[in-house]
Image (cartoon, coloured by chain):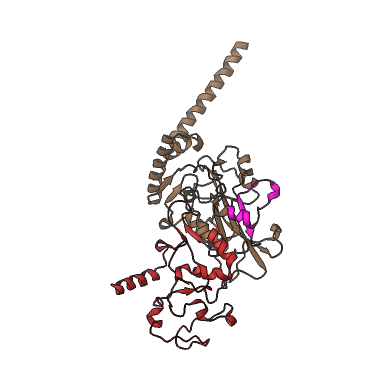
Amino acid sequence: MQLVLLVLLLFLMEVPSSSLARQTSEGFPVPPPPFKQGMFPCSNCHASMELNIKKRELRDEHTTIRLNHAETMRWCLDCHAPRNRDRLRLYNGQLVEFNRSYLLCGECHGNILGDWKAGIHGKRQGYFMGGKRTYLLCVHCHDSHSPRSKPIKPEPPPYRPGDKENAR
Amino acid sequence: MRDKLYTRREWIRNLCLTALSGSAISLISSCGKEEVEDFLQKHFLEMTREEKEALITRLEARYLKKYGRKFKVSAQEAIPDTLWGYGLDLSRCIGCRRCVYACVEENNSSRLKPQSQWIRVIRLKKGSLVDLENSEHYYNPDLVPEKDFLYMPVQCQHCENPPCVKVCPVHATWKEPDGLVVVDYNWCIGCRYCIAACPYRGRIFNWAEPNVPSDQWNTSVHYLGNRPRMRNVVDKCTYCIQRVRVGRYPACVEACPTGSRKFGNLLDPQSEIRYVIENKRTFRLKEDLRTEPKFYYFFEA
């Protein structure tokens, strides 16, 4: 039974569809966090591993993670709960699920969390009145380990009047 | 003598009138059924509910025949107690033009030959926000945002005091009760006075029928919004009237990758747009013209 639930959970986590948005306990309809395939739940691997709280370079696993987010004063276990890896840890020791990660982000970026709650920072999709809606989490747009947005390629400019490609 | 002259004049006048009416009748009868129907159609605001329903079935049948797709034409009226307002965060817009192409797809605009876009993203040098004359909307760098520029998408601002409505000689464009400035494409005569009057370049002229691949039609359309336009009429952004009147965000809001675009009901104190107006530094474009746009640009304080 537990295995079935686990598989179902895994399946749910890997479909980033807005139709799967579920209410968090604060009442925000957020889609599942963008986990890489096979990453979650973390306890799959970590439950059997010994806890090592020392800050070090990871050589075997998580090698693609480049911490670029106040990295000199931070380490994995400042945000990931050491004894329950399927949760995040707030300053006061409270553990929160990954789909409530905005609480963690808001501990430093409080004004932005305020804007996010009002729907000003970040993006909302679907229906603002009646109907289904989705609020994207911080981590859907920002990589939590390296949050600064990267430049992207723009769509092509409009044709100028007289451009041959657009002439009828 | 005098009587004779008078009768001759009368005779000529009658002859002319007969010829005119005869040619008019033959003109109408030489037209197709569709053209006659369009010619005799009433102004949208003067139609009764039954007439609107008949019009919708007529249009749906016509679109099915013409484009081979089953369209759903809506003529939904404004929701009571709504006044739609738009917010755009200039400190987050990166000028990627995703909104432009999302708008084109949603609103069945012509893709190419001719190209028709309702949103124009202009690029300004940092520190010269008001210098619109030296702005550019044909910029094409490899990556955005560029270091020394900021970007400002401009579309129809849905003015409370719209100059385009004032100049229309046939009242083909008007402001709806929920604040949307709309066009009845059937009533538009294509004189383009409104294009000349709009200070935001928010109106676009259709030089030809929309050139849309048949599998790319958005079949959920509104009569005053994104239904396929005919040749020689003016169209413009309607804040996605087909979406917002059922409570859904406009296509550009959903497409923006940075979440710069905000939308809401100005009469609802809990709405997102009211939060923007109350908590951010906002301005409206060319406020000095007293057009009272309902499109608020804002940036982080």
| The C terminus of chain B sits in image quarter | bottom right
Residue A27 image offset from top left, x and y in percent: 46, 60
Residue B215 lies, with reference to residue B205, above or below; the image says below
Q: Residue at x 67, y 61 (%)?
A: B135
Query: What shade does chain A have?
Result: red
Q: What stretch is highlighted in magenta?
A: B274-301
Q: Residue at x 45, y 34 (%)?
A: B48
| Identity of the residue drawn at 49% across and 85% down | A53
Please name the residue shown 69% across and 57% down the image.
B132
Question: Residue B174 vs residue A86: left or right?
Answer: right
Q: Which of B245 and A101 is in front in this view?
A: A101
- Nearer to the camera, B211 or A45: A45
Residue B233 vertical placement versus B122 (above, below) = above
- Percent from the top left, x then y, of residue B202? 60, 51
Q: The brown chain is which one?
A: B
Residue sitting at the far front: A92
Task: Check the image and report above or below for B263 versus B25.
Answer: below
